[in-house]
Image (cartoon, helix red, strand yellow):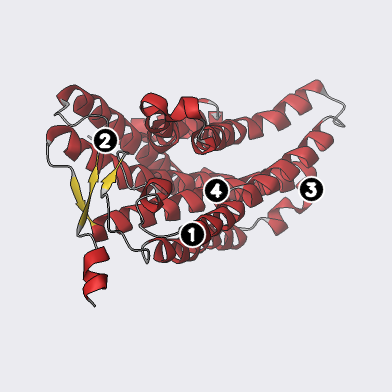
Amino acid sequence: MAKRNETQLSEFILLGFSASRQPFLFSIFLIIYFITLMGNMMIILTVTLEPQLYSPMYLFIRSLSLTEIFYISVTVPRMLRDFLHLDKGISFIGCAAQLYFFCFLGTTECFLLAFMAYDRFVAICHPLHYTTTMTKTKCLELTLGSWLSGIFLSLIQISYVFSLPFCSSNIIDHFFCDILPVVKLACTDTFANEIAILIYSSVVIPLPFLLILLSYVRIINSVIKIPSSIGRRKAFSTCGSHLTSVTLFYGTATITYLKTKSIQSYGGAKVMSLLYIIFVPMLNPLIYSLRNSVIKNAMSKLIKRSYMLK
């Protein structure tokens, strides 16, 4: 029993970017956080209030925006707090909760992006069957499946990580409780945990990406068979926003978790992780609104209607 008490830490210390206060970074990240919330909220309101957008593609975009709001809110508010405080301690439970929601929402986004690719595959490769295959009910089921996958897969993984004994250093060299920095602090052999992380990552990242890849192989194969160049351009335009979003999310996450020595040096991993944790959620509303004329027009109508009501 005494050994159990000795191995349990009550809190971790997040090193962040600096031990000192950083009001300039606070201002910058507060603006980014505000822009991200407003942009994604605008997407959600536009899809919800405009009946012309009640199709699976736009319902998936709305779900993605909702996920992005929660995703960035897991890390940024804590970062903003640490920019203005010298005490950077986070409780054991707080760290576990942050890591859980980070994994849960990241997993949800991976599956959502995969199902969005499947939606585009059905729309382009089987247009005559699209309305019967991708119904609103099917869209809701796939979205719910994404969230449930995130909830349960992450719960198993985080329970396994935080069952480890932590009895030496409690300093996390990051600005949030990421899974690998936390596991490194355990004072026991973590080989089994690292295997579990590998299995979890194999399900969460390569599996959805494989579905995305297969969908786009079929899409490209179908599009190049379209005789009209206008038809080909129109077909590709419906996939452009999603493909950009996938490239940003998977590209930045993959680069970060390759963990090369050059990235690890001088806090490079922390800087790289900002790309998919903060900048991707901020850019997604711009990607889907600027590249999609239907959403852009619906937003304009919504803004004009709100202005007239005043």
Residue at (43% x, 47% y) in the render? 180
Q: Nearer the viewer, mark 4 or mark 1?
A: 1
Disc 3 designates what residue? Answer: 126
Residue 29 appears left or right of 151:
left
Neighbourhood count class around disc 2 (C-alpha, 10 Å): few under 14, some 14–19, many 20 upward = some
Residue at (73% x, 39% y) in the render? 216
Provide the secondary structure element on which disc 3 rests: loop
Provide the secondary structure element on which disc 2 rests: loop
Disc 4 designates what residue? Answer: 110
* Amino acid type, mark 3: His
- Quadrant in which the N terminus appears: bottom left
State which tag comes first along the sequence, 4 or 1.
Answer: 4
State which tag comes first along the sequence, 2 or 4.
Answer: 2
Disc 2 designates what residue? Answer: 16
Separation (CA) of disc 4 from disc 3: 24 Å
Disc 1 designates what residue? Answer: 193
Mark 1 near mark 3, Cβ–Cβ under 8 Å? no
Q: Nearer the viewer, mark 2 or mark 3?
A: 2
Neighbourhood count class around disc 4 (C-alpha, 10 Å): few under 14, some 14–19, many 20 upward = many
State which tag comes first along the sequence, 2 or 3.
Answer: 2
In the displayed orientation, state which residue is furthest to the bottom.
Answer: 1
* Amino acid type, mark 1: Asn
- With respect to residue 57, does 165 lie above or below? below
State which tag comes first along the sequence, 2 or 1.
Answer: 2
Residue 86 appears left or right of 57:
left
State which tag comes first along the sequence, 1 or 3.
Answer: 3
* Amino acid type, mark 2: Gly
- Quadrant in which the C terminus appears: top left
Q: Position of residue 53 (x, y in %)?
A: 52, 44
Residue 170 appears left or right of 127:
left
Q: Nearer the viewer, mark 4 or mark 3?
A: 4
Please tell me in which quadrant of the rendered image residue 16 appears.
top left
